[in-house]
Image (cartoon, helix red, strand yellow):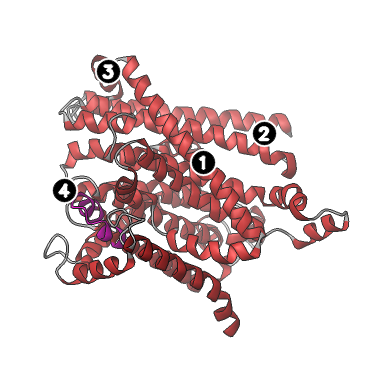
Amino acid sequence: MKPLSRLSAASDLTLGLIGAILAVAAWEISARTGLVDPAIFPSPSLAIRAAAERLTAETVADNLFWSLLRVFSGFLLGALAGAAVGIAAGWYRGFGAIARPLIELLRPIPPLAWIPLAIIWFGLGEPSKFFIIFLGAFFPVVTAAYQGMRSIDPMLLKAAQTFGLSGVPLLLRVAVPAAAPDLATGVRIGWGLSFGVLVAAELIAADRGLGYMIINERNTGGSVGVIVVGILLIGALNLITDAAIGAAIKRWIGRWHGA
Amino acid sequence: MTRKLVQALPPLAAFTVLLLLWEAGVRYGFLKPYQFPPVSRIARGFVELSTTGFPTGVSIWSHALTTILRVLQGYGAALALAIPLGLVIGALPVVDKLTAPLIVFCRSVATLSLLPLVIVWFGAGELTKVFLIGYGCFWVMLSNVIAGVRYVDPTLVRAARTFGLKGLELYRSVVLPAALPRIFAGARMALGVGFMVIVGAEMIGTIEGLGALIMEARTFYRSEITIIGMLVIGLIGFTISAGLMALERAMLPWAGNLDRVRR
């Protein structure tokens, strides 16, 4: 069974690769033949050439570094806070009764809508960006953590109690692992949101980062090629980090729930 | 009923205390009124917004209407394209495998990062915003429609085959109904994405719409208007997602267990 599934996975990959190559080729050809005006939508090769002319590797690396730093710090603290509040709200009934309505009240407000208020509170610097990326991770994680806690099989807790576990050890060693799959889903969603929010925040109010790099190129009347390369770079970054976080989560959860 | 009321009491009390502390904090100078506009000021701002409007002449309702119309145009276009396309791709495994990485990548492209490029294409007008909403909704919808069709329980399909169903008939009477819950879930997710995108898109280069309202209000030091705008955005988002969920329950009674299935 195993070699067969490996074989089909390999052929899936080949097909996917063929599809991607076809798409890039179609894009390149349509720009070369003038089907699409290269001045507004350059082909990949032209875009990369233009970007190489206008940007140094150092500029790109610097912007990349700032974007990653922002999104990781905001996401990490947002997800940790969300997990802590969600787990506590699910475990301690009194805390949940008060915290949950407040969270439910604020949750429908998309993180991007916090940008003006974040600027009012923290100014135009890094803290306001950190804050909205934090929110992007916080709300999905807090909701998922709470739901995970509420849908734990009560038999599991009763069984653990029979073995003498109670209080915080019961919470940390039985309840949290049982809620982990839900929590993980929330973390994945939170990462996606944090990343989207990061780009938006950098477009709207920033003086460095990949989002700033592309909007600045547009505002100074630079090259469309740089914008296209920037967009692809942001997309690739999102894809890679999401895959990495997905794999990390799988390993973490695999300890309790099988692979 | 009474139990529900009793349950609602502690959070309501906590909330009231919070608002009172906030109001008092501003009155006695612990909080800056610009950073934390007190409830009384928010209430006055709301009256102003719904009568004279901000900027003058544009009431909160017309801001909201503008935003909703933009979202619906982009969302409608995305659904109209993604559903038929997804149904076809999902039914043809080879096409699905060919397009899978492409779709994953396009979905990973942060929608708002397209903004500078789309401005080059269409200028800073309506079309740009509608396009961005459409882009964000389209890929979410497409991948959900494909997944809905692809991951129909094979037992169902085999059972239907045993009864002699095949081809288009099988697709229409078994695969499609089984895929609908997932398609509906995708439609709900896509609308969420649409609302997220529009708020960001309206913050750049426009003065109409809720996103523009909250950003403009900040520039004029009217933080209470920013907060009202945020609450209205949240209210619209909440109403729509609750409405779609009710619609889903009414239209797809067989989808009841989807929320308990791992996705």
The residue beneath circle 4 is B125
The amino acid type found where label 2 is placed reads Ser
The amino acid type found where label 3 is placed reads Leu
- For disc 4, the neighbor class at 10 Å (few under 14, some 14 to 19, many from 20) is few
**Is residue B68 depicted above or below B215 in this figure?**
below
Q: Residue at x 57, y 37 (%)?
A: A246
* Nearest to N terminus: mark 2 or mark 3: 2
Tag in front: 3 or 1 = 1
Quarter holding the C terminus of chain A is: top right
* Nearest to N terminus: mark 2 or mark 1: 2
Tag in front: 2 or 1 = 1
Which chain is disc 2 placed on? A
* Nearest to N terminus: mark 3 or mark 1: 3
Disc 4 is placed on an element classified as loop
Range covered by the magenta-colored residues: B212-228
> How far apart are labels 2 and 3 at the CA level?
44 Å
Number of the label disc, if any, that sits on residue A5: 2
Disc 1 is placed on an element classified as helix
Quarter assignment of residue A203: top left
The residue beneath circle 1 is A77
